[in-house]
Amino acid sequence: MRAAYFGPSGTFTEEALLTQPDLAAASREPLRTIPEVIAAVESDAADVGVVPIENSIEGSVAITLDTLVFESELLVQREVDLPISLNLCVRTGTTLADVTSVASYPHAIAQCRGWLSSKLPSVAVTAANSTADAAREVSRSKRGGRAAIANALAAEIYGLDLLATEIEDHPENQTRFVVVGRGVPASTGHDKSSIVCFQRADRPGSLLGILQEFAARSINLTKVESRPTKRSLGDYCFLIDFEGHIADELVADCLRNLAARQARVKFLGSYPVAGEASRSRRNAATRAWRTADQWVEGIRGQLRATDELLP
């Protein structure tokens, strides 16, 4: 397997990739931008790509969503949740009083806004392509006083010291990553699906009509988000995550009705839910399905080949 990921080496994306045994054993290629990762899979230069899609503090990673929605036909294969700990990384010998500039990925900078305001209020803050790219640039720079906000892995790879640790403003900081590729993974019993709904007309109640299709079938929504369609000001589409798999008849019926009655629908994937409880929930769902299947087969075993009671 060939896995492309948002690089360079040492990013949180690489950390997330390394938590997956099959991806950790794959041939790995770091790429500079998220669209490049997705394009590599589109062109068959890689089998799968790993990119960040959502942070618990700053919300969605817009470039990932927009590339998947508007520029790609790839589908989400799985999600990976990773706890995020951010550090101020510097060259050896640099003190907090020496720091004159801080660089990092915009999402990481935003997650440390309070700490930067308190500890380094007058320091210039600049954007980098990634947290690891910021660490790499600081390690290569000949100018003193430069610092990067990055993870411990990047600091280790690029030979930087951790001047301050866990500087994110909210301790329960997590980022969700997705593995993108081709095809739909088999149902596991604890899955989620992602779609995009494009309204056929901007009319009152159109979003309500979309949501009612889920409510009528008791399908639980886990996320609803609007994004500009890139066509005109005020024209939005709706990204919806919900529990269930396209193989589930209830989900298939919901999407069928959505496409026929409510909106143009783009399918982004059905895939296993990440998280600590996901494995136990999948095992419980498998046991419940096996028990229910045995019950149904027991009833079907009572079917007569012909009905002798009929005249």
Image (cartoon, grey):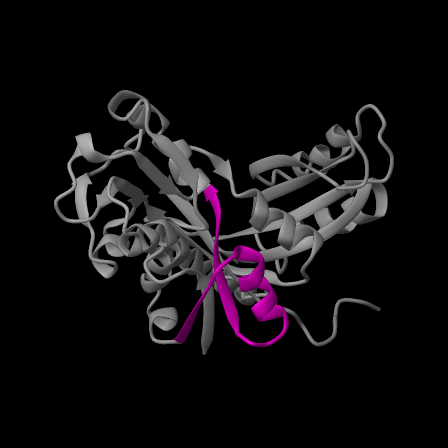
Rendered position, 168 above or below 65 = above
Q: Provide residue 131's location: percent of width, then percent of height.
A: 37, 48
In-image side of 285 versus 216 (left or right): left
Q: Is residue 214 magenta?
A: no
Residue depicted at x 64% and y 41%: 239
In-image side of 211 versus 53 (left or right): right
Q: Is residue 33 magenta?
A: yes
Residue depicted at x 60% and y 41%: 219
Q: Provide residue 300's location: percent of width, then percent of height.
A: 60, 67
- Which residues, given as a range, are shown in magenta? 27-54
Q: Provide residue 114's location: percent of width, then percent of height.
A: 33, 23
Q: Is residue 247 visible?
A: yes
Question: Split into 4 quadrants, where in the image is the N terminus?
Answer: bottom left
Q: Quadrant of residue 44?
A: bottom right
Q: Nearer the viewer, residue 42 or 167?
A: 167
Residue depicted at x 74% and y 28%: 208
In-image side of 305 versus 184 (left or right): right
Residue at the extreme front of the image, as rendered: 142
